[in-house]
Amino acid sequence: MHTVVLRTHGYAQQFQDAFYEQWGHQDTTGMLSFLNQWKKAEPYNPDVYVGFFNYYAIQTFEEETLFLTEMPQDGGEYLEVRDSLNNVSGYLSSQMVINDSILNIAFDWVDQGIARFPDRLDLRMGKVYLAVETDRMDLVRSGLQSAILSGDSIHHEWKWMREEVLDSGQYFLYSSVQGHLYELFEKQDSIADDIILGISQLMLQQDDQQYFAMTNIATLFMIKKQFTLAIDWLKKADKIYEKDPIILSNLGYCYGELQEWKKARRCYEEAMKWSDAAGREYCQRQLDGLLEQERK
């Protein structure tokens, strides 16, 4: 079961300890009763909203039993169903399904929390995580946009656990956003790619030297085999972040795809100087591959 767990420690430690003890026992009845008591006792504690969000988030995913007439081919577990003559008549399998009604309640609680405590980055990133897991791409886009744009208004004085102001708040925000963009890369679809591009452009509007954003856009062009455009973005990143082995090796890959062998070799050789052992091994394999291609 996918779950969203924002473990926080705030003003009333005993409330949180008791809540997560019930969480560990999956005592959903006890959790809800306790959360209502907690909200009554501390209506202005942001961690109350975290608790309600988590409570409904864990119930968003439900297991559904399926009866199939053909053997499942997805590699999952299943049980054979046999008739009175011991012949296989079907297969029992299961899949996780999303309860949209409960999902909407979870989002409602986290939205209330964000509205009341706009500087709590854990609430914002928790919402995005659940939106990614439930394929609510509209909320992924709006959640990331809102977090980035809201950062300016609070001077990036973000809070996380214990209402603690995060050091290097803007960098922490961008790192958190980037983690979700990596998840979108794995989806490999046009909607996810469009979100990656839009969010990366938004980060660049705030910081025109944003490393994550530049490499995101370059990666999108590499995926689309638009290597000349990818090189343009990688060169921009290389001017700011010199000696970065990932940027250099990606440049080598792009030049290799364009059959610009000399430039490709130069990039891989430079990347090797700044790589760890695994990176040097990768670059050497690429250089060996380039040599074979040149001989053809």
Image: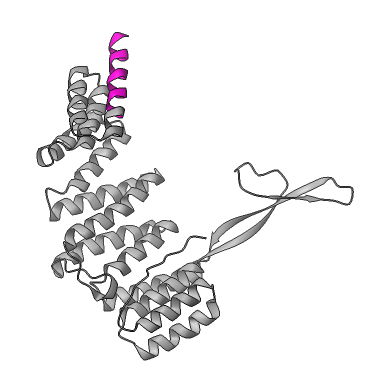
Q: Name the foreground residue: 264 vs 285.
A: 285
Which of the 4 quarters of the picture holds residue 87? top right
Rendered location of residue 273, percent (x, y): 18, 30
Which of the 4 quarters of the picture holds residue 45? bottom left
Rendered location of residue 173, percent (x, y): 23, 60
Please say whether residue 294 is one of the residues in the magenta stretch. Answer: yes
Q: Residue furthest front?
A: 277
Q: Residue furthest right?
A: 85
Residue at 39%, 90% in the rendered image: 40
Q: Is residue 229 visible?
A: no
Residue at 34%, 73% in the rendered image: 8
Q: Name the foreground residue: 279 vs 51.
A: 279
Residue at 37%, 60% in the rendered image: 129
User: What kind of secondary structure does the magenta stretch mostly adopt?
Assistant: helix
Does 82 sit left or right of 121 as displayed?
right
Rendered location of residue 136, percent (x, y): 41, 59
From this view, report whether residue 17 is shown above or below residue 3.
below
From this view, report whether residue 117 is shown above or below residue 166.
below
Q: Residue furthest top?
A: 295
Q: Is residue 256 visible?
A: yes
Please say whether residue 193 is one of the residues in the magenta stretch. Answer: no
Does 273 sit left or right of 104 as displayed?
left
Q: Name the foreground residue: 239 vs 243.
A: 243
